[in-house]
Structure formats: C-alpha cells, structure tokens
Image: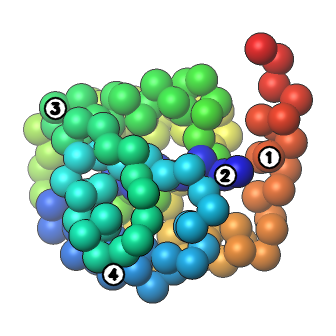
C-alpha cells in the first residue's frame, strides 16, 4: 500500500481539493496523510480517509518530514505558493531536502502532481512497495 502526503499553501488549497477530487479513485487504496486544513478540505469533498497532522506553520510540515526521514512515505504532493512568503520557510526547505535525501518523489505544482499520479496509476511506484516489504525492522 502506497503512503502519500498532501500539503497545500492557503492560496493552493482549492487547486489541491479539485485535483484530489478528480483523481480520487487513484488514491482510494493508499494510506493518506495531510497537514490539518488541507486534509479537512479534501475529506469534505471526497470519501477519502486522511490522517491529519497539525497545520504546516504549527509543525505539520515537520511531522510529515518525520515520516520522510523514516522512509515511510512514497509520494508527496505539496502545492506551494511561489508568490507568497511563508513564515515557516525553513521547515519547507527541510522537508524538500529530506525528500531529496530519501529519494521520495515530491510534486510542488499541479503539472508535476498529475505526471506522478498517472505514473502511480500505471504501477510505476511498485518498487516502493518492495522497499517497504523488505525494510529491516
């Protein structure tokens, strides 16, 4: 089972909800995580169950980062707002760095998110399931 996290800055939340709604079927068998408000908004519009962490500025980005550091996520869709300064920018940079270190695919815009979800639907993420299956305890 793939483990996927959703994060969206305030001005990107509607875009995230619309995207997840369009691809709801692709996510139904995954274990889903999200920062607080983003997860609430997605669950209001879909039948998906999402484990919600705190809001990003209150530590939610770091909570998702902890999953990345433990290699417990397979994909992150993080719709960032490049035109708005974020007060928790260091947390965002740390999360993206962890994704690079662990080799976790991360989409920071809707175009990349769609490419990764289509790859996931084709089965291109099957290797991640093997990583989890044979992960040392």
Say which residue label 2 marks.
2
- CA neighbours of label 3 inside 10 A, class few (<14), some (14 to 19), many (20+): few
**Label pair 3/4, CB-CB below 8 angstroms:** no
Distance Cα–Cα, label 3 vs label 1: 31 Å
Does label 2 or label 1 sit earlier along the sequence? 2
- Spot the residue most to the top: 137
- CA neighbours of label 1 inside 10 A, class few (<14), some (14 to 19), many (20+): some
**Callout 4 secondary element:** helix
Say which residue label 1 marks.
129
Q: Is residue 57 above or below residue 79?
A: above
Q: Residue at x 36, y 74 (%)?
A: 46
Say which residue label 3 marks.
58
Q: Position of residue 71 (x, y in %)?
A: 64, 30
Left or right of 8: which side holds 10?
A: left
**Label pair 3/1, CB-CB below 8 angstroms:** no
Distance Cα–Cα, label 4 vs label 1: 27 Å
């Amino acid at each position: 089972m793939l483990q996927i996290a959703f994060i969206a800055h305030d001005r990107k939340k509607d875009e995230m909800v619309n995207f997840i709604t369009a691809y709801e079927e692709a996510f139904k068998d995954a274990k889903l995580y999200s920062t607080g408000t983003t997860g609430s908004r997605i669950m209001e519009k879909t039948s998906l169950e999402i484990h919600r962490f705190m809001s990003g500025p209150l530590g939610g980005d770091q909570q998702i980062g902890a999953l990345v550091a433990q290699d417990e996520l397979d994909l992150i869709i993080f719709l960032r707002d490049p035109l708005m300064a974020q007060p928790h920018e260091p947390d965002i940079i740390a999360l993206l760095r962890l994704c690079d270190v662990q080799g976790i695919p991360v989409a920071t815009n809707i175009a990349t998110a769609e490419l990764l979800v289509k790859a996931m639907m084709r089965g291109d993420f099957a290797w991640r399931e093997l990583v989890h299956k044979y992960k040392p305890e």
